[in-house]
Amino acid sequence: MNIDHLKLFVRLAATQNISLAGKELGISPAVASSHINKLEESMGVRLVHRTTRKVSLTEEGLAFLPRAEDVLSSVDIAYASVGNGQVSPQGTLRVAAPASFGRMHIVPALKGFLDKYPQVNVDLRLSDSIVDLVEGGFDVAIRDAKLNDSSLIARKLANDKRVLCASPDYLSEYGTPKTPEQLQQHQCINLMYLDNWTFNVDDKQVMIKTTSRLRTDNGEALRDACVEGIGITINSVWSVYQHLQRGELVELMPEYPLHTQTAIWAVYPSSRLLAPKVRVFIDYFAQYFGEQPYWEEALK
C-alpha cells in the first residue's frame, strides 16, 4: 500500500476536494485523482463518491479512514524511533473531551498548541458521553472521572477538586447547612443518577441521600441553576472558580470534604502506539495545567 496515496486520502477526507488535497501535497489534480483510483483498485472497493462540486467518502471510505490515519501515525513513530525523535508531529489528531471542560479549558488553549505544531490538525468532539476510543477512531480522550478501564493508558493532567456550593440568595432564604446530615432538609440539584453524596467525616465516609427538584445531564446547567438559587450542588472547582471569585456562589462545609477519586486524565488505547502528535498534545496540556491548575490558583 502506497503511503503517499494514504496521505492524499486522509487529506481528501478533510477537504472534500481532490484539487485542494493534491495542492496541499504538491501534486496536480490529475495526479491526485489517479492516486485515489489506484488506492481503490488496490483495495477492491470504492472509497470516494465523486461529483462535479465535491467528493465525499463512501461507507467503506468512512470505515477505512481511522485505519489509514493509524498507518500514517505508525509510519511517523517508525521514523521517530530511528531519528532521535526529531520527526515533526503532523496529521489529524482526533480528540474527545467532556463538553463543559472542553469548552472552558481545552478550546482556549488550542491556539497555542496549533501555533506550536503547525502541521497538526485537531478534530475535537465535545460530549459528556464516554466514547469508545478504538471504535470511534480517536487518538486521545480527556476524561474527568475515576478511571476503571485497564485497556487504556492514562496520564493525569490535573486534580479535580469538587466542592459543595449554593448561591447567597438560596442561603438567605433557606439557611446554611452546617453538617452533611442537614442537607436532607435542603433542596439539591444533581447530575442524573447521582443523588447520593459522600463526605469524609472524622476519618470515615458518610453517605447522604439528597432530595432533588431538578436533575440534569449537563454540568454547566447544574452550575447555572445553582447560581439562580434553585438549590445546593456539587461542582468541580474548574467549573465554578470564577463564580466563587465573584461571590455568585459560596462554598459550603469545607471542613467536610467530599469523598471523590476523580481527576482530569488524558487517555489513549493501550493497543495503539503513541504517535508524535498524541505525545505532544498530552505534554502540552500537562504543562499548560501544571501541578496546580490556574483555577485553583485563582481561589488562593
Image: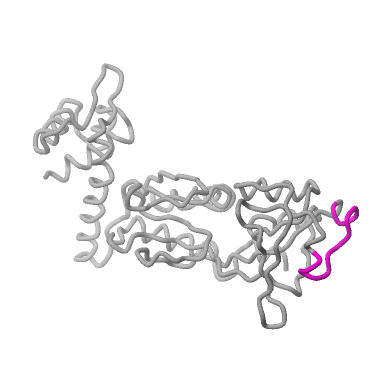
Does the magenta segment cover residue 175?
yes
Q: By what rule are the colours in the image chosen?
A: one colour
Is residue 86 rendered to the left or right of residue 132?
left
Residue 253 horizontal/vertical position (percent): 78, 69
Query: Which residue is located at x 66 percent, y 69 percent?
Result: 198
Is residue 130 rendered to the left or right of residue 60?
right
Name the quadrant containing residue 153. Answer: bottom left
Q: Say which of 251 and 191 sits in front.
A: 191
Residue 278 horizontal/vertical position (percent): 36, 57
Magenta segment range?
A: 170-182
Name the quadrant containing residue 47. Answer: top left
Query: Which residue is located at x 73 percent, y 62 percent?
Result: 164
Q: Say which of 125 and 204 sits in front.
A: 204
As drawn, which residue projects farthest toward the bottom? 203
Query: Which residue is located at x 33 percent, y 36 percent?
Result: 14
Residue 90 horizontal/vertical position (percent): 31, 50
Instruction: Establish if 113 lies above or below 159.
Output: above
Dominant SS of magenta comes to helix
Query: Which residue is located at x 72 percent, y 56 percent?
Result: 233
Image quadrant occupied by the C terminus: bottom right
